Structure formats: structure tokens, C-alpha cells
Amino acid sequence: MTDALQNPPSTGAAPAVFDDPRGLRRAAVIAVGVLVCVGCLAVLAVAAGILYADPHAPAALPAEAGRTSAPR
């Protein structure tokens, strides 16, 4: 019993899991991976641009100072 567990009988050559002789599947997987990576980096760049606060930005004007009409 121990020999059968340690040395199971061979059933022949295992079938190829990814039989891709031209490499098209690999190229497609790499292309999708690159697009996902670039997409994630773009989302992070947009989020960083939105969240970035410029330390040297000009001071905002008070609400009363701009775009108001004269009192009547």
C-alpha cells in the first residue's frame, strides 16, 4: 500500500493544459494585463489630481466680494 501511494502507476503523458503553439493566448493575456494595469494607473492619477491641494494656490475671494449686484 505504501509503495502504491509513493509511486503511483504512470498513466502516460499528461495533456497540455495550454496548447498554444503560436502564442496567441499568451499575447492576449499579456495585452489584457497591460490594459488593466494602465487603467488602474489612470484611475490613480485622476484621483491624485482631484485630491491634490496646491500649497501655493492664490487665496480664494470671500463670497461677498464677487458676482453680486448692488443692493436696491
Image (tube, rainbow, N blue to C red):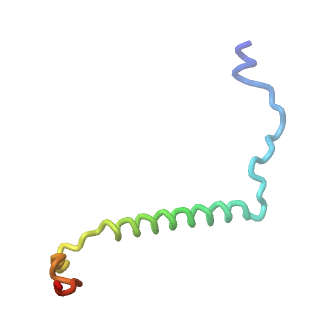
Using the image, determine if residue 62 lies above or below residue 40: below
In this view, the residue in front, 47 or 4, is: 47
Quick check: 40 left or right of 33? Answer: left
Quick check: 21 left or right of 30? Answer: right
Viewport quadrant of the C terminus: bottom left
Using the image, determine if residue 18 lies above or below residue 61: above
Using the image, determine if residue 1 lies above or below residue 6: above
Extreme residue toward the front, this view: 72
In this view, the residue in front, 50 or 37, is: 50
Which quarter of the figure has residue 55? bottom left
Viewport quadrant of the N terminus: top right
Quick check: 49 left or right of 41? Answer: left
Give the residue drawn at x 77%, y 65%.
22
In this view, the residue in front, 14 or 27, is: 27
Extreme residue toward the top, this view: 1
Give the residue drawn at x 78%, y 61%.
21
Which quarter of the figure has residue 52? bottom left
Q: Position of residue 53 (x, y in %)?
A: 25, 70
Q: Position of residue 19 (x, y in %)?
A: 78, 54
Q: Position of residue 12 (x, y in %)?
A: 84, 37
Give the residue drawn at x 81%, y 31%.
10
Q: Position of residue 2 (x, y in %)?
A: 70, 14
Which quarter of the figure has residue 59? bottom left
